[in-house]
Amino acid sequence: MKHLIILLFSIVIVSCSKESEKETVYKNLEGNKTDTLQSIQSTVKMVYIPGGEYKPFFGSNTTLVSVAPFLMDERAVTNEEFLEFVIANPQWQKSNIKRLFADTNYLKTWPTDITLPENALKDAPVCNVSWFAAKAFAQSVDKRLPTLDEWEFVAMADETTANARKKPKYSDSIIDLYLQKNRQFKSVKQSPPNYWGIYNMFDLIWEWTDDFNAVLTTGDSRSGEYNDKNLVCAGGATSATDVMNYAAYMRFALRTSIKADYTIGNLGFRCAKDTTIIKQ
Amino acid sequence: MKHKHFTICATTLLITALLSCNSTNTTKPETSSAEAALAMVAEGNPEVAEVTGAPKVPAPIGARAAKKLIVNLLTTEIEGIIADSIPYTFWTFNNTVPGSFIRVREGDEVTLNLKNDGSSILPHNIDLHAVTGPGGGAAATTAPPGKEASFTFKAINKGLYVYHCAAPPVPMHIGNGMYGLILVEPAGGLKPVDREYYIMQGDFYTKASVVKQGLMEFDNDKAVAENPDYVLFNGKKGSLLGANMLEAKVGETVRLFVGNGGPNLTSSFHVIGEIFDNVYLEGGSTVSHNVQTTMIPEGGSAMVEFKCEVRGEYVLVDHSLSRAFNKGCIGKLKVTGEPNEKVFSAKTLTKE
């Protein structure tokens, strides 16, 4: 069943991709992986997320999406870890990276290929990394990027409940975190974890997901009714399940504004992994 | 005999009425003006357009031909003063609220470059109501922090148009000040006047930031309830008062480009003590005369013109007066010059 979902997912992603070049690049990346990617050790704790059914932010009211159990890093990938990755994999250093895989701002604050910025904290989340780079890092630690549904499933939690969406201040309290400037320079794990034990879902960075621009794949996409243009202007009000969830609008707005080679100053990532364990 | 005279008289009146009716009926040429503008060729190399912060406007287009223009806008998220030394986090085009005034001509080909500043937290874009095409350019210009997006459009409908950010959640982006005006002048330009000013009304919904003491930011609940703390001209209480008053001299003609960014409230724009000689209703091509108060829809505009006959201070308000009286929607135009007692004279009579 899980394989079927993944298969369907891949088909949808490929068939919905607007940029034909993306597919080519993706294959290219796969080639990179098998040929040359060196593994590195990851010590970050992974948290078991039991999954379940959840209502995506975009979709019809009645459509629930099933999220299989998975493991998620408790925090984002840090500067220090990414440094280790590029040392082991020179093809992902800023002067060597293929332009298809990242724009010219890739790791732009790093003074050299293998030096962190002087004022950067080692344990602050790495930013200015493309989706391709994030994906390669994940592969190098034998993980993957979380799917958008997995990420959003975890994002429903506050500190005390798995699904805090119905709480009146749920969205507002996230926006309070979103509106802080320069928060991406802070260390990870300095604020309380959420219900699952996951840190920094909202207070440090935007995060890549594997299918970041596949809003199409959440909810009922078969009708072809939903597309990213629906997000723009008042159109965004017709396809969301909770029009008061401004925090989610902001997140999805960011996701629809980026492309796989983009590197953004407050956009990083964390990793996830499949699991065969089913805990109750 | 009397009867005959009456008939002639009546016929003449009828003909006159019909003729005058015909001459003021300008709707026919209007319907084809977009097509005419579409056929105009924008010559030469692209030039960077001059843009200005309110209340200033760029120089009139005058008699120039249609050309290629480049408009550069930068989206930012910055702290500014909203009222009485109170800081607020504004989101802007070119660091001002309202954003820069853009002035083009019908037939111009405009390349709009939207750069989102690297220090931004959120993606932004621009929907220009002067644009014919999907989203007014919104999807085409959506840019995450540090990125730039661009599109080109041909200005085929003359008039005064609002532009705004349309990134979700839109009411928040507009509520934080992401709007401005773009004027598409007719071929040959608008009739010259002595003074032109740029004014934009907006409603602001505030709450205290939990992060920074004293800083105010957007309040979603108040916005949904459409209950603003401030209704302001040009994004700041007092932006057109004191040293910032608009100015004109007796005998001069004034044109105000007035827009309404909202996000929610419609404006009843009025200048106390003046009557608008001409109002380009809703910023379009229909001109109304002798207007006291003109309605400016949210996401809409009006161009108003009047001649300053009498010196004094003229108060600009949204005539939904609680907004002027209690929420900051007030500005002034100071007219200087010689007294004009023929039009206005005040005498104090003391009775014994």
Image (spheres, rainbow, N blue to C red):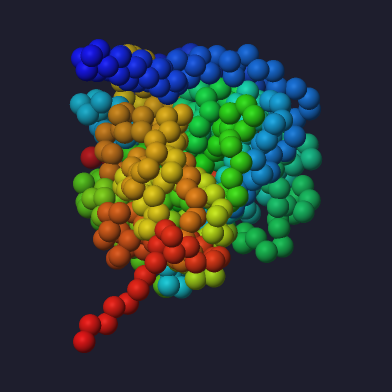
Q: Residue furthest front?
A: B1
Residue at 43 percent across and 60 percent down: it is B342
Whole-percent x, y for residue A15 in the image: 48, 13
Can residue B241 be seen from the camera position used here?
A: yes
Q: Is residue B8 left or right of residue A25?
A: left
Identified at 21% across, 46% down, the residue is A166
Camera-side residue: B175 or B3? Answer: B3
> Where A191 sits versus B21, above or below?
below
In percent of width and height, residue B161 lies at 48, 36
Q: Can residue A106 be seen at all in this image of the molecule?
A: no
* Image spot of residue B173 (x, y percent): 43, 46
Is residue A123 depicted above or below B141 in this figure? below
**Location of the N terminus of chain B (image quadrant):** top left
Nearest the camera: B100 or B189? Answer: B189
* For residue B30, side relative to residue B3 (left or right): right
**Number of callouts:** 0
Q: Is residue B248 above or below residue A218?
A: below
- What residue is at 51 percent from the left and 42 percent from the top? B181
